Image (tube, rainbow, N blue to C red):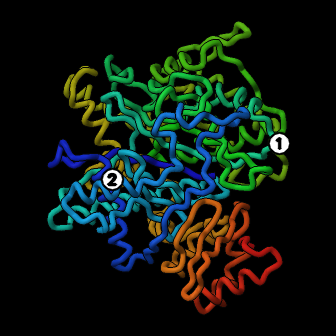
């Protein structure tokens, strides 16, 4: 599994600044920190060769001419970088980095108008939380660099999902699923799960509607921006189930479930349960044991549940029943419990126990879950201001508090202050987060990618999720190493190879002497 976070970005002193330019500053500022000794900086371009964003899991491919420009993620953005350089009065050859492959196996790049951090692949939800937090650490380092660089105006990065002016940006999750599981089975079981999942992992938002046109507070930042049940788009006509069939792995064996409906979480417990419970429901679907409570109108149910922090609103099912979001979650939790193997690992048991306990707490009184759930923690802060100063939901100060909650600056962000005061539960150690920003997970192919970037920054000239391209001195042909098996390329399989090699040439010679040439062991 893995996460993708598009950060909200502003430069307070430059209200009309081009957000793409600001996002490129973030990427280049982090590159500068790497050059200063926090790690190696590879001149690695992103390799788009194997990307297929218009292939639909329902068995067809969208015509390129019919696609929204935002869907063409297989097109490099270097031209835009050149345009930006020229816009700043610099020569076109002055490199403006739009993409970095990091030592920890992650990708930091400009995605349209936002800086985006795509985490390395991990095998469990706690590691996913750790390397997701590493992305926040990278973002803070970039902000600090820009702030202290003469001639640059400070930028602020927010881990949120909307600017409350009709624009929403994503926080995506990715899960590896066997190709043998029919996509229709995934969709039918996941739609009601995703519609109700927000009660345990929504990020909370002041205002209702895409344009923030109605006063109030809702559970999810993303709910008002979804229009369809199933579809290929991610920025227009957003669907609850995204059908992009781009596995970034052996296509005959795996599919990548690309989840676009989640909120960006600052709460580590919310993030942990978002990823952990989804993985458990996917396991249920694989076993044919998942409940399928068919909703009458999933898109409307998504909004209705989000707009009801009391958690009492009921949504209609096609079988005539009406259930709350909590009751829908209890259906899935009970099914997971019933299917739990006797030898379940400790982390799986922890996710299930936390899920059960949280649902009981939310049923008793949602406000008791402030230490665990983002939307409750934010609502508790907002209600304190409302009570103290008699503020109505239309008061602009509440919108500012909402924004300030997601501010990643340690000295300014409200969530950061709650964390320092011990008012929210933390799951990962800050020292481990700092280490995860520069080191890859050891038990996935991210180890191979990150270690190659760290050891051979000059020779790795291209990278993607499922391959690396080497250019060796004196050799005319580039050498591509495939990494299509996500659970290969681990420290156990390749660590000794890295340790023994004297340079990139020696490393490749040792690597390619194996039985399966051009494939990472």
How many C-alpha atoms fall within 10 Å of the one at disc 1: few (<14), some, or many (≥20)?
Answer: few
Residue 126: image quadrant is bottom right
Q: Position of residue 94 (x, y in %)?
A: 29, 68
Instruction: Name the residue located 46 percent from the left edge and 44 percent from the top edge.
Output: 265
Q: Position of residue 156 (x, y in %)?
A: 27, 51
Q: Residue furthest top?
A: 320
Q: Is residue 500 above or below residue 367?
A: below
Q: Secondary structure at mark 2?
A: helix
Q: Position of residue 112 (x, y in %)?
A: 39, 45
Residue 490: image quadrant is bottom right
Q: Secondary structure at mark 1?
A: loop
Return the residue nearer the eye: 55 or 332: 55
Q: Please indicate, yes or no, whether residue 519 appears anywhere in the rendered image.
A: yes
Q: Position of residue 19 (x, y in %)?
A: 29, 46
Q: Is residue 491 above or below residue 74?
A: below
Residue 484: image quadrant is bottom right
How many C-alpha atoms fall within 10 Å of the one at disc 2: few (<14), some, or many (≥20)?
Answer: many
Q: Is residue 414 above or below residue 391?
A: below
Q: Is residue 155 left or right of residue 495?
A: left
Instruction: Name the residue located 15 percent from the left edge and 64 percent from the top edge.
Output: 151
Q: Please indicate, yes or no, whether residue 359 appears anywhere in the rendered image.
A: no
* Precedes in sequence: disc 2 or disc 1: 2
> Label 2, label 1: how many angstroms apart (C-alpha)?
39 Å
**Residue hosting label 2:** 23
Q: Is residue 262 above or below residue 454?
A: above
Q: Is residue 477 left or right of residue 73?
A: right
Looking at the rendered image, the quarter that the C terminus falls into is bottom right
Marker disc for residue 396: none
Instruction: Name the residue located 84 percent from the left edge and 39 percent from the top edge.
Output: 287
Return the residue nearer the eye: 380 or 478: 478
Report the number of numbered marks: 2
**Residue hosting label 1:** 180
């Amino acid at each position: 599994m893995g996460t993708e976070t598009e950060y909200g970005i502003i430069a307070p002193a430059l209200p009309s600044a081009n957000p793409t330019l600001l996002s490129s500053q973030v990427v280049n500022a982090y590159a500068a920190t790497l050059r200063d000794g926090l790690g190696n900086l590879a001149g690695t371009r992103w390799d788009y060769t194997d990307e297929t964003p218009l292939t639909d899991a329902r068995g067809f491919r969208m015509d390129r001419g019919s696609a929204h420009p935002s869907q063409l993620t297989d097109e490099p953005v270097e031209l835009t970088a050149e345009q930006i350089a020229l816009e700043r009065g610099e020569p076109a050859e002055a490199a403006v980095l739009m993409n970095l492959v990091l030592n920890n196996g992650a990708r930091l790049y400009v995605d349209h108008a936002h800086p985006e951090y795509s985490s390395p692949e991990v095998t469990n939800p706690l590691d996913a939380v750790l390397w997701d937090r590493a992305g926040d650490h990278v973002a803070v380092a970039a902000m600090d660099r820009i702030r202290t660089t003469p001639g640059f105006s400070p930028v602020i990065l927010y881990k949120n999902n909307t600017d409350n002016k009709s624009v929403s940006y994503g926080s995506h999750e990715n899960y590896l699923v066997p190709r043998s599981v029919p996509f229709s089975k995934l969709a039918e079981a996941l739609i009601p799960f995703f519609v109700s999942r927000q009660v345990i992992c929504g990020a909370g938002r002041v205002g209702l509607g895409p344009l923030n046109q109605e006063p109030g507070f809702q559970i999810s930042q993303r709910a008002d921006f979804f229009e369809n049940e199933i579809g290929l788009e991610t920025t227009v006509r957003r669907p609850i189930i995204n059908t992009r069939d781009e596995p970034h792995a052996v296509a005959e064996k795996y599919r990548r479930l690309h989840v676009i409906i989640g909120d960006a979480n600052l709460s580590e417990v919310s993030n942990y349960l978002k990823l952990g419970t989804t993985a458990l429901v996917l396991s249920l679907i694989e076993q044919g044991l998942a409940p399928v409570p068919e909703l009458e109108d999933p898109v409307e149910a998504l909004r209705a549940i989000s707009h009801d922090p009391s958690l009492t609103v009921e949504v209609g099912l096609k079988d005539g029943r009406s259930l709350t979001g909590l009751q829908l979650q209890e259906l899935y939790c009970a099914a997971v419990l019933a299917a739990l193997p006797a030898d379940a690992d400790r982390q799986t048991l922890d996710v299930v126990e936390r899920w059960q306990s949280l649902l009981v707490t939310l049923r008793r009184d949602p406000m008791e879950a402030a230490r665990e759930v983002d939307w409750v923690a934010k609502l508790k802060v907002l209600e304190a201001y409302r009570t103290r100063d008699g503020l109505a939901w239309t008061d602009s100060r509440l919108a500012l508090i909402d924004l300030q909650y997601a501010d990643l600056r340690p000295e300014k962000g409200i969530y950061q202050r709650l964390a320092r005061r011990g008012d929210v539960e933390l799951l990962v150690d800050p020292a481990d987060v700092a280490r995860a920003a520069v080191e890859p997970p050891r038990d996935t192919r991210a180890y191979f990618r990150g270690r190659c970037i760290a050891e051979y920054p000059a020779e790795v000239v291209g990278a993607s999720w499922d391959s690396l391209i080497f250019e060796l001195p004196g050799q005319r042909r580039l050498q591509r190493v495939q990494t299509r098996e996500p659970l290969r390329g681990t420290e156990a399989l390749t660590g000794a190879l890295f340790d023994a090699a004297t340079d990139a040439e020696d490393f490749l010679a040792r690597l390619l002497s194996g039985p399966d040439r051009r494939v990472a062991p």
